[in-house]
Image (cartoon, rainbow, N blue to C red):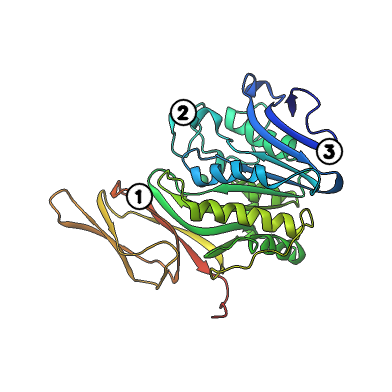
Amino acid sequence: VKRHPPGGGVGPGVFRGKISFDDPVLHGWRWPCFEVTGTRPGPHLCVMAGVHVNEVSSIEAAIRLQACFAPETLRGSVSILPIVNLPALYQYTQYDCPIDGRNINFTFPGQPGGTFSEALCHALLFDWAREATVHMDLHGGDLRERVSHFVMYQRSRAAADDQRREALAHAFDADLIVGFKPSLMSSPGRAITALAAVGRDAVMSEAGSNGVVDENAVHFHVGGVLNVARSLGMIDGPPSAAARRQVVCGEYLWVECPAEGLVRLFVEVGQPVAAGQLLGVVRNPFGAEVGRIQAPADGHVLWCVTHPVLRARDFVLGLGLEARPTPR
Ligand SMILES: [Zn+2]
């Protein structure tokens, strides 16, 4: 990482400026970055947002978090990158990076000298966050979707690693916690998976909707990051308790729209559903039903579309499948 002005981030203090990466593919791009280094040694926490630029509650959280850390009270260091998908920012691009049409969220670990998104993903994990004790990726609610308050982490085949990552996820006051199955590590995409594949700790939080800054969602992201910092001993104070149920899910299903038309959903995010339950219907422009959306399994609604107009096979919602019974 090249810092402008050079010297930022070295020794206790605050760096507030733009950083660039060495990869020639990323030449000319400079990312706003905030770094605070404590007067006492400790872990390094990396927090990024804006992989999806319309998920503004997470971007707002990444901005507000900057005021939550100070060199005098921090053990270790925190680096915050509020807008990852910089080329998309003023184009309001949904999901993708406009330079190469790739969804950065499914491009990790990336590769040096690849496309823009590939080069960026690699630079983020192995340059900017190369020394991160914990990496956190904040998301939630692109222009046509609503997400529950949920957190994802990647399970591995090492129980101790899984316990540590699940504990990080529990730092968030989440409706749902999704631990992805270990087989996903052979084909990464999300940063949490690419990092777990090399034995590192990461979580990804989701809260927000429709490109709107929502105070509950902002607090969810901010509170989760601060709880992680407390659990790592970086800042003082007891972690805030969870009020939501934190149902742990072991699998993530994408549910497709069965036909093109206008979708009407009968469920809300965070809601439990039973296998076979009617989740919604698709109607044509004359109001006639042309498709029915049914739950493929018992689960919990992680997110759903908010814009009714969909094509056949577009994703209409995501379902988390409960990993084990939760105390009620
Ligand atoms: Zn996202």
Residue that mark 2 sits on: 90
Q: Name above or below for residue 90 compared with residue 156.
A: above
Could you tell me how far apart the alpha carbons at marks 3 and 1 are, in whole angstroms? 52 Å
Indicate the position of residue 111 as horizontal and vertical percent values.
66, 33
Q: Secondary structure at mark 3?
A: loop
Identify the residue at horizontal 15%, vertical 56% (top origin).
Answer: 288
Going by the numbered disc 1, the residue's amino acid type is Arg
**Left or right of residue 266, residue 38 in this image:** right
What residue appears at the point 87 percent right and 47 percent down from the top-left corner? 41
> How many numbered circles does the render carry?
3
* Location of mark 3 (residue): 12
The amino acid beneath tag 3 is Pro
Disc 1 to disc 2, C-alpha distance: 29 Å
Q: Nearer the viewer, mark 1 or mark 2?
A: 2
Q: Mark 3 or mark 1, which is nearer to you?
A: 3
Upstream in sequence: badge 3 or badge 2: 3
Instruction: Report the disc number at residue 313.
Output: 1
The disc, 1 or 2, on the residue closer to the chain's N-terminal end is: 2
Comparing 272 with 296, the one in front is: 272
User: Local crowd at mark 3 within 10 Å, few (<14), some, or many (≥20)?
Assistant: some
The answer to whether the residue labelled 3 contacts the one labelled 2, judged by CB atoms less than 8 Å apart, is no
Check the picture and name the quadrant holding the N terminus: top right
